[in-house]
Amino acid sequence: MKSLKTLYIGAGILGTLVLAAIFAPLITSYDPTEQDLLQTLSGPTSAHWLGTDALGRDVFSRLMYGARVDLTIGVLAVLLPFIIGVSLGLMTGWFGGKFDSSVMRVVDTVIAFPFYVLAIALVFIFGPGVKSIVVAITLVGWVAYCRIVRANVLVAKELDYIHAARLTGLPTSRILRRHMLPNVISQAIVFSMSDIVLSILAIVSLGYLGLGVPIPTAEWGSMIQEGQPYILQQWWLATIPGFMVVIVGFALSLIGDGLVSRLER
Amino acid sequence: MGYLTYVGKRLIQTLPVLFGISVAVFTIVHLIPGDPADVLLGQNATPERVKLINHQLGIDRPILIQYINFIKDLFQGSLGTSFSNKEPVTKLILGRLPETGMLLTGGIILSILIALPLSILAASKRGAMRDQLVRAIPIIGLGMPQVWIGVMLILLFGLKFPLFPVSGFGDTFPEHLRSIFLPSLTIAILLSPILIRSLRASMLEILDSDYILTARAKGISQTRITFVHVLRNAVIASVTVLGINVAYLVGSMVIVERVFVIPGTGSLMIDAIARRDYPIVQGVTLYFALVVVLVNLLTDLIHAALDPRVALK
């Protein structure tokens, strides 16, 4: 029962954030990129709940619209690696042999590259922006799913129900999809929760470095960077966007923990 | 399988990885749209000059020849010449090593200093309040953006309470130490949640093992068991965990260097991106990947030397 509770609390927090991001135009009447140069760096007022930034943009609406950007890319960026990694993990574990060992050597190579170094190098090639972030995370991210699923397939392959399925002469594709996949995917799903956090962290870091989502789009990482020079006077400018990431991370790890107990019962 | 066989096997496993890395890094530069010559020449690009530069860089030759030349240069320790200041990339990287090395060492030492006592505290009384609190650290800690931790530390210990410099590397050794404290602490705050999670688990496992039971049966005090028997094994475990996470560590360091304006190898790379200096980007990427492979190899070999069961598997 405790696992259900953590799952619900995590989903509740994340759900609230997602709703706030979706209905941002209803919650705040300010355009997140509209500048008001007569009202720069104002403290919190009844008009601007979290004040305005150095260009007079409403911080609260930038935070809400930023949630749209960071959460969407965070989830999108994990989707492709998940699909690629799970499929390759299924196949390498099942077929083994030369195919398995060559994929595993690619895995070893990818692991050797520090993620941020590779991401920065790829952003260099493709230019800053959402596309580069997604490509970078995909190129690196599939490895973890592949390894998790492959390990599970190696174990499940020797279990009776799989032997039985093979003996009845079912085609391999059907065994993999209907019998293997549902039994080996749960760990990958749990991992994807913490992976979303990692990809949001990457978006924020690249945004801070000026290599992420191009300005003036509201994004938490670039908000931290833009707030840094004013940190002594207006500490919240750089603090609150980072705090939002921590909340998302907290919610996702509660969901992950809840899922572990639910799926692996 | 003996230790030497294990070493041999592990070395052979490394070869395809090194090959893969060289291909990947070589490909990176060839994926870049446009001609390097255009970048080098800027406004002065004429077709003849572009052709000349392409010939000098060797990129008008067949791709396989280019790759072989790239590998030849590598074996001679050459990573090419920087476009912007015409210096050898190897020299530029080596010149930034003290900063990066000190930052990494500082980060590792501080993260062990944070993680080890907390893990001992948690594992010594499983399920108690203090265990619950320590277990909550990774849940919060793993969601904190690197840059944000850095900025928060700058705010707290650099500006509100000006104890440490907020940027740069200083000129003398004591200044270096003061300058890298906050960046190292940032790395430590990033690493310790990972360390705490695995250390706590491995300590619980050690506490459950037979030799601890034997020690207890012999009447050895709990303090002695914790600090002599458990701690020694836990330190070995933390070295392994650090080895596994070296890629994450190096990657985070690149970002942290930027936040604190430390002129290390990470900054070298990011500055090179702004100037579109391909050889540096290529060189640093290769260099970091080699470091990761080397550290992983060493971790495995040390681990196997300390724990003979590893080589037997």
Image (cartoon, grey):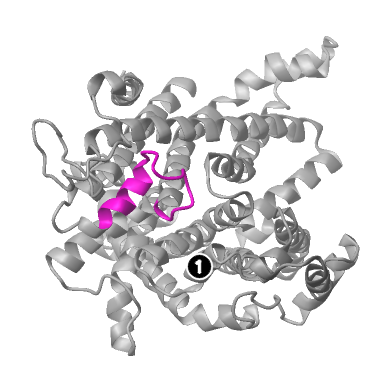
Magenta residue span:
A208-228
* Residue at screen point 20% across, 68% down: B158
Q: Nearer the viewer, residue B252 or A100?
A: B252
User: Can residue B174 be seen here?
Assistant: yes
Quarter of the view holding residue B78: bottom right
Residue at image point 20% right, 60% down? B155
Q: Quadrant of residue B252?
A: bottom left
What percent of the width, then of the height, locates residue A101?
A: 79, 46
Image location of residue A105, percent across then percent down: 75, 51
Q: Residue at x 60, y 57 (%)?
A: A121
The quarter of the picture where residue B56 lies is: bottom right
- Going by the numbered disc 1, the residue's amino acid type is Asp
* Quadrant in which the N terminus of chain B appears: bottom right
Give the residue drawn at x 87%, y 66%.
B60
Residue furthest to the bottom in view is: B172
Q: Does residue A265 appear in the picture of this structure?
A: no
Q: Position of residue A195 (x, y in %)?
A: 49, 38
Secondary structure type for disc 1: helix
B20 in the magenta segment: no
* Left or right relative to A202: residue A168: right
Q: Percent x, y for residue B20?
A: 75, 57
Residue of label 1:
B271
Question: Looking at the image, is A30 positioned above or below residue B113?
Answer: above
Category of crowding for the residue at label 1, using alpha-carbon neighbours closer than 10 angstroms: few (below 14), some (14–19), many (at least 20): some
Q: Is residue B152 above or below residue B102?
A: above
Out of B157 and A241, give the one closest to the viewer. Answer: A241
Which is more toward the observer, A262 or A217?
A217
Magenta-drawn stretch contains A212: yes
In the displayed structure image, the side of residue A57 where residue A169 appears, left or right: right
